Image (cartoon, coloured by chain):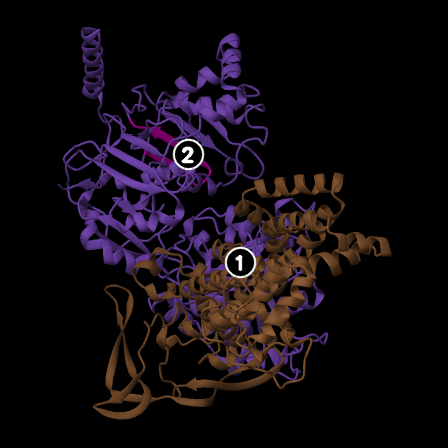
Amino acid sequence: MKTLATALIGSIALAYSFSAAHAEPPEEARMLDFASMEKIIGKKGGAIDILMAKAKDVRQMTVYSNARLVHYDQTFTLVPDILAEVKNEGNKVFTLRLRRGHNWSDGTPFTTEDFRYWWEDVANNEELEPGGIPREMMSDGKPPKVEIIDSHTIRYSWDSVNPLFLTALAGARPMYIYMPAHYMKQWHSKYADADTLAAKIESENVQNWTSLHKRFGRQYRPENPDLPTLQPWMTTTKLPSERIVFKANPHFHRVDPNGTQLPYIQTVNMNIASKDIIAAKAGTGETAMQGRYLRFDNYAFLKQGAETGGFDVYLWPTGKGSEMVLLPNLNAADKGFREAFQDVRVRRALSLGIDRNEINETIFFGLGRPSANSVLPSSPLFTDAHANAWAELDVGKANTLLDEAGFDKKSADGTRLMPDGREFEIIVETEGDSQDTDILQLIADHWKSIGVKLFIKPSQRDILRGRVANGEAVMTTWEGLNRGLATPDMNPEELAPVSPVQGQWPAWGAHYETNGTSGEAITLPDVKRIAELYASWKSAETYQAQAAIWQEMLTLFTDNVYSIGTVSGGLQPIVVSNALRNVPREGIWSFEPTLYFGHYLPDTFWLDE
Amino acid sequence: MTASDKTSADAPLAMAETITAEEQVALERMKAAYADGSIQGESSLPPPDTETLPHFVSEAPFDLRSVEKLTPEQEKIYFASQLTLMWWKFRQHKVAVWSGVFLLILYGSIFISEFLSPWNYQTRHSQHIYMPPQGVHLFHEGEFIGPFVYDVKRKLNLETMQREYTVDETKPLKLSFFCSGDPYNWFGLIPANNHLVCAPKGAPFYLLGTDRLGRDLLSRILQGARISLTIGLIGISVSFLLGIVIGGAAGYYGGWVDMVVQRVIEVLQSIPTIPLWLTLSAIMPASWSPILIYFGITIILGLLDWTGLARAVRSKLLSLREEDYVLAAQLIGANPARIIGRHLIPGFMSHLIASATITIPTMILGETALSFLGLGLREPITSWGVLLNEAQSINVVAVFPWLMLPVVPVIFVIIAFNFLGDGLRDAADPYK
């Protein structure tokens, strides 16, 4: 028995060292330029802990790792990452070339077969994808022509321009146009033996083979330890589990300037803890790097524990266009409010009536920046005019604007009367946390001076969305532009009516989303112009043309105050263990385009112990 | 009441039970003979070998009822109502009395909480965010100048992102009493701006510190008391009504009514309270105004709390309904509602009051727990539960501990109610 066990352990060790011996970066590895990124060359090894609140958060590993076919480099330009080369001919023809000798994490070569499998057997399989191929793969309603040139080159070509293709591949939640074919075929009815598949459907207790294929083929949310991956770390834990262990991918494609294969850190342990105690745990040093589930008001507490916990706390600005925005519902069911909010003078007056400096001082410790809901200064699209549009406190001007708009009569207690005779009392519905409620309380006080009453109505997200969509909610709170760091080639959809969840124009958004079957057609000329611009962005052929469209959209969006911004540049506390190197002291915390830590390439982080 | 009073009051009662009427007459005569009322020895005759007794004749006219005459003290006891007796008994329980006084003061304060609080509970002081509690001083540089506070200087510490306050001991700011301050609407109706105590304009005066928006915690606790204390009373009325009606019906009718009620109670009691509260408060539409939510929550608390009371009512009724006076009432033709309400309930009202007193804290805790979990009351209404809900983050525990102060009144009110209930229960049966 004992000898058997020893033999077993021996063979496992042998197998391990065998695979380790063969673990190597692709022949044509991507050597990172540490000097330009101000990173220092480290050493391999070690394990770190991070904290997450739910098992679904395993997808954060995919976000953090930032391994994409193409991704944004430090200057937010798209560069090939997993791919060796991308040839883009006028946003119409894209030729992708893979790295020579690049293997999946299980050692199988990564070739165009993996792209073909996805395109032919997944995307175009009506059973697997009843919705058809992804929107980003369609241009002018037509799918691309896919040509496999050789085992390492593949070409996608459209007749008209498709600027969304590459950005979708680089997304925080990327579009996957490849799949590990050699592994996935066992779940596919076309390749797998029918009996074996039937037995698996039985044993996994699912309806049909498509569920199996989906369940075992999730690349964005790495739940399946057997699924080969191209990411720096691969999961080794079967869910459900409170501790999910990620091991370094022995075939990862990036190397440091010395040729050492990345990632440096060999093990990442993701510990699942309740959302409410993550700050407390982080404050005692139970995490090596943490930003998620920490809030600005935790900073003082975290800082107190920094010395004993052996970590440092950085403050990264968030990438949101505004920490909180007010969305006047231009499609409100209530006629009085609908007409009021469709009047640009009212929206401007409400924006002018907010004392953003006080909000900044009270809530953000004076570290934010009073601003309209626009892009951030670090975005190439930033202009002062957009950021300052109607964002200065000017009670006099606000009062004049409201008088002109027909809100010139006042009730006994000084509240303005709407043209239909009711008091101008705006009920703001919010699903937000205490921070949003606090900001609203401040705004309620500010608006008293312009004769407008604000009531706060806390609600839940789902209820709120329903009430927005059917026009019951007259004003809601939301967060500012998610793509606060937008570059011209990023999708400007947040500025245009595209979806019924947009609080300022739900009916117009629904109209766009459903191709006119529900919702209402846009009535305001400026909004029509924004919608046209958005359509033209999708067919713009050059970066300059895209930039010009972005600028015009931003001008219309901010000058018309379709969303009332408050303070931008809120700060996110980032806990970083003292032993962890290469984490920049200054960064930007956003889902897109910086992928939280992803933009700073966690595979280059290392432990100095 | 002294000990001798007690025995002399007890004696006739005890005798009346054991001796016959003839003996009683003899006894009375003897008592009249011995003015001090004491009867010594077995025999009515004086012992033979002692000195002859001095001759004594009472000049007073013979009064047949002289023994039944009571001293004023005795009269007080004999003719005292049950309530008075309870009060005398209750008075002996010193802790209960003080608890009662404490609660009376608190309940009294909710009528004038705006007046008592130095600020309006919603007034923000952006210059004094997260200011720790502050002391009131009397002497400045060895000189008495009456109650005053020192000015504070604020410094933003960009290293820790904290606001640091240093006391400026050169600048005493004298407090004024019965002054005008933040305006408020008394009970939402009468506009006023009178406060018990205020600081000079712009001066910091936060005895219990301020919260994240610079709102005075003392004012918030005082005005939160209004909701937190009344929620118990409203809830208890609901649960009382249900408990007496349902328990009364079960006890009076017995049989299948009793059977059904008992099973319902068992089912209700077997459900864990907190999840049940959560479910019920989730049912309340999110579109309700905070004040409606407040009433909704009191009713929920009341709806779930009647079971214990119903059981007590039922068991008491089961025993009392066998009494002859109930039979008499039935024979006269009184209807069940009258018999229960007029003849049965008063028989154990005292017990009900005591049990209600002990239930109120459960209600207060219930509201606090629900609000603490974010499912009860919400801003802008404030209650102790809401305040504690705001204080539940790790930041508060580590950096701003004074925000946990609302827990102090909660603890004291609960303890006071329990002592009071204890005293009332003892007093409920004054003959014991």
Quadrant of the frame with the N terminus of chain A: top left
Callout 1: SS: helix
Callout 2: SS: loop
Tint of chain B: brown
Q: Which of A476 and B291 is in front in this view?
A: B291
The quarter of the picture where residue A231 lies is top left
User: Which residue shows up at 62% across the image and 54% down it?
Assistant: B300
| Side (left or right) of B341 relative to A135 | right
The quarter of the picture where residue A169 lies is top left
What residue range appears in magenta?
A: A82-99
User: Which residue shows up at 18% across the image and 7% down it?
Assistant: A3
x and y, in percent, of residue A110 in the image: 34, 23
Question: Is-magenta flag for residue A601?
Answer: no
Q: Please name the amino acid that badge 2 sits on.
A: Tyr
Task: Residue under label 2, please give it.
Answer: A220
Name above or below for residue B27 compared with residue B76.
above
Task: Residue under label 1, please give it.
Answer: B358
